[in-house]
Amino acid sequence: MTTPRLLHTMLRTRNLEASVDFYTRLLGMRELRRIDVPAGEYTLVFVGYGDEAEHCVIELTYNYGKDNGYDLGTGFGHLAIGVENAAETCAKVRAAGGKVVREAGPVKHGTTVIAFLEDPDGYKIELIERH
């Protein structure tokens, strides 16, 4: 029997290409696969830092005609990505047109350096410095 593991997190997007660009060009992930299902009126794009067989990835879901977006709700918090230098990553994302919503600095009441970005759909991405 295989050990259970987290496979992916699904995020709905109102502009698939803008989201793919954000996660690949700005955050350095790779587009791993794309599935267009016209009969179901949706397209899925899986992005990540490594092969799905060994790494957790993000499934970006575009439902045809949902260009006005979705209510993000209050239950979802954020995605977290380990980076070597949060300040440098923020600078790179900002220079490329991305949105930084919390500059790199220590977490409240702690020493771990974090920062927050926002993707084109408003989802928050936490950067956590990992040395």
Image: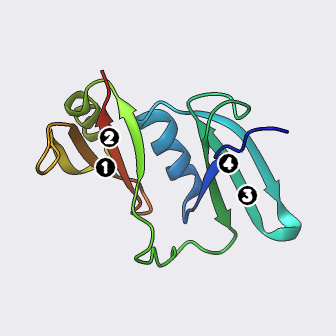
Three-letter code for the amino acid on which mark 3 is drawn: Thr
Task: Say which label, 2 or 4, has the lower sequence index.
Answer: 4
Cα–Cα span, label 4 and label 3? 7 Å
Identify the residue position indicated by label 2 in the image: 127
The image quarter in which residue 81 lies: top left
Secondary structure under the numbered disc 4 in the rendered image:
strand
Image location of residue 14, percent across then percent down: 55, 66
Cα–Cα span, label 2 and label 4? 22 Å
Please give the label number shown on residue 45: 4
Q: Nearer the viewer, residue 2 or 74?
A: 2
Three-letter code for the amino acid on which mark 2 is drawn: Leu
Where the C terminus falls, by quadrant?
Answer: top left
Give the number of the mark in front: 1 or 3. Answer: 1
Give the number of the mark in front: 2 or 3. Answer: 2
Q: Are marks 4 and 3 in contact (CB under 8 Å)?
A: yes
Identify the residue position indicated by label 3 in the image: 43
Please name the residue shown 61% across and 28% down the image. 50
Q: Are marks 2 and 1 in contact (CB under 8 Å)?
A: yes
Task: Say which label, 4 or 1, has the lower sequence index.
Answer: 4
Three-letter code for the amino acid on which mark 1 is drawn: Leu
Cα–Cα span, label 4 and label 1? 20 Å
Q: Dot 4: within a 10 Å radius of its alpha carbon, few (fewer than 14), some, or many (20 or more) residues?
A: many
Give the number of the mark in front: 2 or 4. Answer: 2
The image quarter in which residue 85 lies: top left
Cα–Cα span, label 2 and label 3? 27 Å
Q: Dot 1: within a 10 Å radius of its alpha carbon, few (fewer than 14), some, or many (20 or more) residues?
A: many
Three-letter code for the amino acid on which mark 4 is drawn: Val
Give the number of the mark in front: 2 or 1. Answer: 2
Task: Say which label, 1 or 3, has the lower sequence index.
Answer: 3
Please name the residue shown 70% across and 35% down the image. 52
Identify the residue position indicated by label 1 in the image: 117
Cα–Cα span, label 1 and label 3? 24 Å
